[in-house]
Every structure is written in structure tokens, then in C-alpha cells.
Image: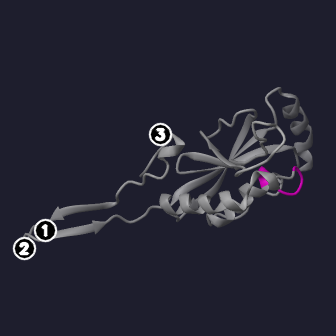
Amino acid sequence: PGAGPSAGPSAMGAVSCTRCVRKDSGAGHVQAIIAAHVPVPVSLHVYDIGSSGAWTAVNRLLQPLGTGLFHCGVEVYGWEWSYSFACSSTGTEYEGTGVFCSRPMCCEGHSFAMSVPLGKTSLSEEEVLKLLNTMEKEWPVKDYDILKRNCCHFCNELSLRLGVGSVPSWVS
């Protein structure tokens, strides 16, 4: 239900109505039936940093050690959500949120490496959007720290709040 991958992020708030109306066959009464929410899958998409291929080679060497240098995003309801550092148009001031969305497995500036299924969330699309609205305020761009508060930390927090547990330890 709601906006899918073909719609733009601005349409994300448009949640489809889950109420249908049918005529009762016996007495002619109209009944409203509320459709049950079906849990939806949540995936972690992992990227090698950059698009040159250099970090891909580094990550392949680090993989046997259970680590690497990654960018990641969490996909839910057809959009991938992450957190990043960005500077303003002046290049010196930092403002707004660091939370952003992209099409799944297509984060600009990074090389897609793999997807990790995290489970299913019981939150509705509307609840997920409210959660992300809250997290946008909690994750301002000015608080980005490459070691202590980055995309991997954001994805772990989002995954926990979606009720699917932590991201794999080798990601962070």
C-alpha cells in the first residue's frame, strides 16, 4: 500500500486507504472491513564506499577478518533510508537533517555490494514515515562523525526501531 518505488519521495506520505466497504448479503447493511496489516520485509543494503572500485578491493581483503569500510541503507516499503554528511551550498555551514532516501541498491556515490535480510516489521507505512520524521530531527547533518555517528549507526538504530534487531556486527 501507499507510494512505491515508482513514486517520488514527496509522495511517501500518501498512504493507501485500507478500509473497504461491502454490502452485507443478509440484511442489506453496509459493513466496513479493516484490512489486517501484513508485516513487510526490511533489508540492509551494503555498499563499498565510493565508486572507483578501490574500496571494493580493500573490503575483500578485510572481509575474512570480519570487517570493512561500508556505506549502508535500510530498505522498507520500497525506499532505502540512510544518513550522510553533507555541506550547505556555501561549503562551510551544516544545517538540516542528514537522513535521506534513495531507490534501493542505488545510493549515489557508492558501489552496491550486497543485501542482508533483517526480518519483517509490523509497523505500517504511516508508522514508518512518522518514525523517520522523528529520526530526521534526531540525526542532524551537523552531528555526523565518521567513526561515532555515521550511516552504519543510523541503520542500526532504524533497524532496532523497526523491530528487526541490530544490523550485523561486521557492518559497523
The answer to the question of whether label 2 and label 1 lie on touching residues, with beta carbons closer than 8 A, is yes
User: Which image quarter: residue 165?
Assistant: bottom right
Judged left or right of residue 99, residue 122 is left
Q: Earlier in the sequence, mark 2 or mark 3?
A: 3
Mark 3: which secondary structure? Answer: loop
Residue type at tag 3: Ala
Label for residue 87? none
Residue at position x 76%, y 34% in the image: 110
Q: Residue at x 70, y 51 (%)?
A: 96
Label 3, residues with CA under 10 Å away: few <14, some 14-19, many ≥20:
few
| Label of residue 24 in the image | 1
Q: Which residue position is annotated with label 3?
A: 7
Residue 148 point in image, percent of width and height: 87, 57
State the extent of the magenta-drawn residues as a range: 146-152
Q: Which residue is mark 2?
A: 27
For residue 167, say whether it is visible: no
Q: Is 53 situated above or below 69?
A: above
- Using the image, determine if residue 93 lies above or below residue 55: below
Q: CA distance from mark 2 to mark 3?
A: 41 Å
Q: Quadrant of residue 107?
A: top right
